[in-house]
Amino acid sequence: MPGRTSRARAAVRARREPLLLAGLATVGTVVLAAADPRTTGLYPPCPLRALTGLSCPLCGGLRAVHDLAHLDLAAAWGMNPAVVLLAPVAVVLGLRWLRRPRAVPVVGPRTALALVVALVVLGVLRNVPALVPLLGPAAAG
């Protein structure tokens, strides 16, 4: 039936982007799980940290993903608590997007602003010496 075939093709086409993004995220996670950012030297250092010695909100993110892939939640939290908190949100949004591909999981301007403010606050707080043990990253890099 031509109508059924064209609908099926349209459904596959609509899911192409979320599936591609999910595939890239999966490959990236597998690479990070296999090649520890602490020891391989495969990944570049954070430019802000290399230039200033300060930790940006994303510092330790690769190490956190490596630890999450190995189900070590405590170590991941020690590297970057934002990654630990945002990873499940990203998975849920990705699954929602895959389920309803036309409804791209775009956040509104207030949510985007709140996220930016939270990341800036995290970037400032994680450089306060007394808070480094709580907000990481626990090791240089």
Image (cartoon, rainbow, N blue to C red):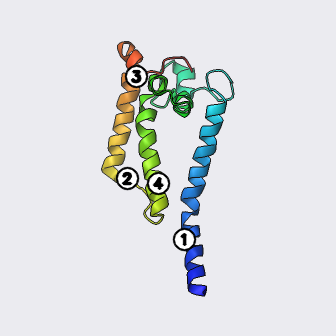
Answer left or right for 11 relative to 100.
right
Q: Residue 135: which numbered mark, if any?
A: 3
Three-letter residue code for mark 3? Leu
Amino acid at the residue labelled 1? Ala
Q: Height in image: 112 above or below 30? A: below
Label 1 sits on residue = 11
Residue at label 2?
107
Task: Give the number of callouts.
Answer: 4
- Residue at image position (56%, 30%) is 70
In front of the other: label 3 or label 4? Answer: 4
Which numbered disc, 1 or 2, marks the residue closer to the eye? 1
Question: Residue 116 sits in which quadrant?
Answer: top left
Residue neighbourhood size for the residue with mark 2, other residues' Cα within 10 Å, grouped as few (<14), some (14–19), many (≥20) = few
Q: Disc 3 to disc 1, how far (Cα)? A: 43 Å
Residue at x 60%, y 74% (from the top left corner)? 9
Secondary structure of the residue carrying numbered label 1? helix
Pointers 1 and 4 in contact (C-beta within 8 Å) = no
Determine which of the numbered discs, if any, sits on residue 95 in the image.
4
Residue drawn where x is 40% and y is 36% of the image: 85
Question: x and y percent of residue 73 in the render?
Answer: 46, 28
Give the label, 4 or 2, closer to the camera.
Answer: 4
Above or below for 96 versus 82 = below
**In the displayed structure image, the side of residue 40 where residue 96 appears, left or right:** left
Q: Which residue lies furthest to the top in this view?
A: 130
Q: Which amino acid does label 4 sit on?
A: Leu
First in sequence: mark 1 vs mark 4:
1
Pick whichever of labels 4 and 2 is earlier in the sequence.
Answer: 4
Dot 4: few (<14), some (14–19), or many (≥20) neighbours within 10 Å?
some
Alpha-carbon distance for marks 3 and 2?
25 Å
Quadrant of the image occupied by residue 32: top right
